[in-house]
Image (tube, rainbow, N blue to C red):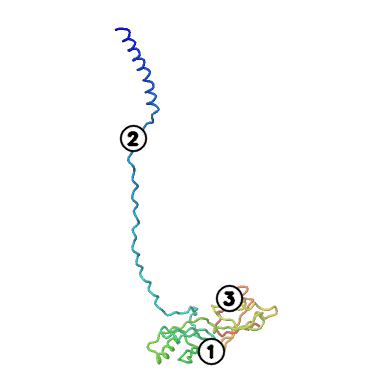
């Protein structure tokens, strides 16, 4: 090989060596391209489906019924007396219903029926009497007698007590209990000879009550239960 050919080969090799680092640097500075990912399409939004309105069953109107007022529970053997407060309730004939008080003459007033005797009758007996009287004006009347307040069951206490006068028997009451309701007995009372006046079958009788004995738990049988109309006298 001649000299010119060697020079040309050396120059070609030198050029080749100098070109490789530039190509490598260019390849390093070139940004890497990420693989293309397919675009994600947004999920279609589903519109809410309108529901048909729920049908509501109509509320039935309340059926009118007889309104019976609240009363008291009469004690065993109770009969209606003067000043007792009653409610006379007719189911269909509302105009006949009324609240009434037994008058001193023993009668009550009811619309259309006028005066009806009530004293000495039980509530059921009075109901039967009103039913019979109302049957002349209305067909098959339905009536109820309600005792609202008992004022006829009275006892009386007089004499040496702080609070003499009439007392209503709303519950079973003994002589000792009545004395307590009247405030006890006065200092100078004759507590050993207290009298209970009672009428039995139209005949007046007298019973004796010894407060000192009963307070000492002696002769307790004399602490009797009082009856309507009894009068206790503390001398």
- In the image, 94: left or right of 204? left
Q: Earlier in the sequence, mark 2 or mark 3?
A: 2
The image quarter containing residue 26 is: top left
In the foreground, 190 or 100: 100
Tag in front: 1 or 2 = 2
Q: Which mark is residue 220?
A: 3
**Label disc, if present, on residue 35 of the rendered structure:** 2
| Quadrant, the N terminus | top left
Mark 3 lies on a secondary structure that is: helix
- In the rendered image, residue 197, in percent from the top left (x then y), is placed at 59, 86
**What residue would you read off at disc 1?**
103
User: Which residue is painted at 33% across and 45% down in the image?
Assistant: 41
Contact? badges 2 and 3 (CB < 8 Å) = no
- Horizontally, residue 214 falls left or right of residue 62, namely right
Image height of 25 relative to 178, above or below:
above
Q: Nearer the viewer, mark 2 or mark 3?
A: 2
Relative image position of residue 91 (x, y in whole percent): 42, 83
Camera-near label (1 vs 3) is 1
> In the image as oriented, which residue stretches furthest toward the front?
4
């Amino acid at each position: 090989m001649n000299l010119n050919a060697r020079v040309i080969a050396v120059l070609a090799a030198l050029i080749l060596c100098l070109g490789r680092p530039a190509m490598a640097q260019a390849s390093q500075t070139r940004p890497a391209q990420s693989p293309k990912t397919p675009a994600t399409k947004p999920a279609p939004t589903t519109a809410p489906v309108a529901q048909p309105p729920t049908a509501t069953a109509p509320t039935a109107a309340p059926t009118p019924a007889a309104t019976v007022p609240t009363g008291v529970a009469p004690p065993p053997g109770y009969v209606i007396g003067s000043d007792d407060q009653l409610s006379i309730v007719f189911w269909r004939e509302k105009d006949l219903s009324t609240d009434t008080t037994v008058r001193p003459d023993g009668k009550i007033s009811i619309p259309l029926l006028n005066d009806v005797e009530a004293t000495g009758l039980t509530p059921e007996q009075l109901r039967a009497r009103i039913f019979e009287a109302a049957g002349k004006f209305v067909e098959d009347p339905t009536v109820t007698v309600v005792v609202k307040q008992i004022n006829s069951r009275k006892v009386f206490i007089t004499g040496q007590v702080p609070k003499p006068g009439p007392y209503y028997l709303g519950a079973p009451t003994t002589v000792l209990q009545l004395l307590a309701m009247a405030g006890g007995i006065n200092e100078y009372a004759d507590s050993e000879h207290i009298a209970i006046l009672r009428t039995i079958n139209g005949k007046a009788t007298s019973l004796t009550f010894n407060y000192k004995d009963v307070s000492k738990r002696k002769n307790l049988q004399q602490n009797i239960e009082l009856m309507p109309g009894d009068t206790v006298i503390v001398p």
